[in-house]
């Protein structure tokens, strides 16, 4: 049994499902489907670090240090101390702005707007702080994906030292940026053990490191899905949790921090909205509108936000089921990738499925999803189509 399978059978069905696939068809490590921005970022990272292969001198290290320097300055407002906005602006401009623009200029616009609005006093300083913090986190999430690609590219080019450096950068981002966010979601939603985002992120990284050290890049591509999708889920749950907090605050009359929470929701949502738009563009756009700080935060309702997320995820799941059905036996690898992608997104909405269907029926859906993946892997089209219809019918009953 491969280590990836051994790792995931002890976690959850979703992890077991993840273990069966070599890559994520949306952010594939060893296919051409990754974005040009990520490819460019990975290439630039390789070029700028080729002369000094140490994590201390890595571009990502300098960026994380700049981010922490900005946060330290921004956090002065918590103690009613004066914030040096010129320092924040110069730090961002010199260490992060160019790289952020390479991956997504919307992130730069979001962060820069926060800096300028905080500096001018146009926005509440805490709102500006959240725009800068969460916008930079969104950039780091996308950078993590480009670094995962850079690991595999370097390994394929037999540049082992470079590959290990890029993986050290992934670990640094995880420790400094993603784990603190995941810890808050674990605490808020009381996710423990096999359900813990932190545990799944760390288990994914550990398995990736083992695969990399053994030169097993196929298994590296498999296990990176646990790392990436657990981080992805933490951003989704972060945005969703702020919708809940906003409605609770409105109902209790404690409305002083509504826009701050709305900004946090929008900032986390920035990281994943492009992906979700591919599932249900209308639902993804509605979420953007609700979270946009130009709109009234009191219009945000937790149930509506949760339902919109479900629709977006359901759209992506359905799209991958349709893709699998269109493929023939000559595209087995592509079919497995698409089936895996569908199951990954199905697992992401486990909590709302549990609320609607109950534990027994939800577990039944995941068992069907595993069986569907197995049927696709075995080229059993008849069984795969039957299971696909069952899964989609159940999913449609949840999101309608």
Image (spheres, rainbow, N blue to C red):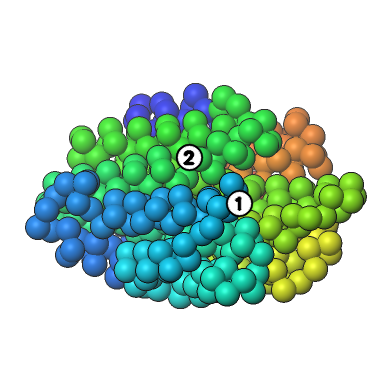
The reply to whether dot 2 and dot 1 touch (C-beta < 8 Å) is no
Residue 312 seen: no
Residue 108 location (% of width, % of height): 47, 72
Residue 219, x across and y down, in percent: 32, 40
Disc 2 target residue:
179
Q: Position of residue 273 (x, y in %)?
A: 59, 64
In the foreground, 379 or 50: 50
Q: CA distance from mark 2 to mark 1?
A: 28 Å
The reply to whether residue 111 is in sight is: yes
At x 61%, y 43%, the residue is: 347
Query: Does 128 appear above or below 347?
Result: below
- How dense is the environment of label 1, judged by Cα within 10 Å: few (below 14), some, or many (20 and up)? few
Location of the C terminus by quadrant is bottom right
Of all residues shown, which one is farthest toward the left? 51
Label 1 secondary element: loop
Q: Position of residue 326 (x, y in %)?
A: 54, 65
Q: Nearer the viewer, residue 251 or 227?
A: 251
**Label 2 neighbourhood size at 10 Å, few (<14), some (14-19), many (20+)?**
some
The image quadrant of residue 217 is top left
Q: Secondary structure at mark 2?
A: helix
Q: Quadrant of the N terminus?
A: top left
* Callout in the foreground (2, 1): 1
Q: Which residue is mark 1?
A: 80
Depicted 238 relative to depicted 285: above or below: above
Q: Residue at x 65, y 69 (%)?
A: 123
Q: Is residue 385 left or right of residue 170?
A: right
The residue drawn where x is 37% and y is 37% is 205
């Amino acid at each position: 049994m491969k280590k990836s399978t051994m790792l995931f059978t002890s976690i959850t069905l979703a992890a077991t499902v993840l273990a069966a696939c070599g890559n994520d068809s949306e952010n594939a490590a060893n296919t051409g489907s990754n974005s040009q921005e990520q490819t460019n970022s990975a290439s630039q990272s390789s070029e700028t670090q080729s002369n000094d292969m140490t994590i201390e001198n890595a571009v990502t290290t300098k960026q994380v240090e700049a981010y922490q320097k900005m946060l330290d300055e921004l956090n002065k407002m918590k103690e009613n101390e004066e914030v040096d906005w010129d320092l924040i602006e110069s730090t961002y401009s010199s260490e992060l702005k160019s790289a952020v623009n390479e991956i997504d200029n919307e992130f730069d616009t979001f962060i820069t707007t926060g800096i300028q609005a905080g500096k001018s006093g146009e926005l509440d300083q805490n709102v500006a702080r959240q725009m800068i913090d969460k916008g930079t986190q969104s950039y780091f999430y996308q950078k993590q994906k480009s670094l995962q690609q850079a690991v595999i590219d370097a390994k394929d080019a037999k540049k082992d030292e470079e590959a290990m450096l890029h993986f050290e950068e992934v670990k640094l981002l995880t420790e400094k940026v993603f784990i603190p966010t995941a810890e808050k979601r674990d605490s808020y939603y009381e996710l423990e053990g096999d359900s813990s985002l932190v545990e799944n992120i760390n288990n994914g990284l550990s398995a990736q490191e083992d695969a990399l050290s053994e030169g097993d890049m196929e298994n590296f591509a498999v296990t990176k899905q646990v790392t990436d999708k657990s981080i992805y889920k933490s951003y989704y749950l972060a945005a969703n949790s702020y919708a809940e907090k906003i409605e609770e605050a409105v109902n209790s009359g404690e409305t002083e921090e509504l826009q701050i929470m709305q900004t946090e929701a929008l900032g986390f949502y920035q990281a994943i909205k492009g992906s979700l738009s591919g599932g249900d563009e209308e639902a993804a756009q509605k979420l953007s509108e609700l979270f946009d700080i130009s709109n009234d935060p009191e219009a945000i309702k937790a149930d509506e936000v949760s339902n919109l997320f479900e629709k977006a995820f359901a759209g992506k799941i359905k799209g991958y089921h349709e893709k699998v059905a269109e493929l023939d036996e000559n595209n087995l690898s592509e079919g497995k990738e698409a089936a895996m992608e569908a199951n990954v997104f199905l697992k992401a909405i486990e909590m709302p499925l549990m609320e609607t269907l109950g534990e027994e029926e939800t577990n039944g859906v995941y068992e069907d999803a595993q069986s569907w993946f197995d049927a696709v892997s075995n080229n059993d089209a008849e069984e795969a189509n039957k299971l696909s219809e069952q899964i989609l019918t159940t999913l449609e009953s949840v999101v309608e």
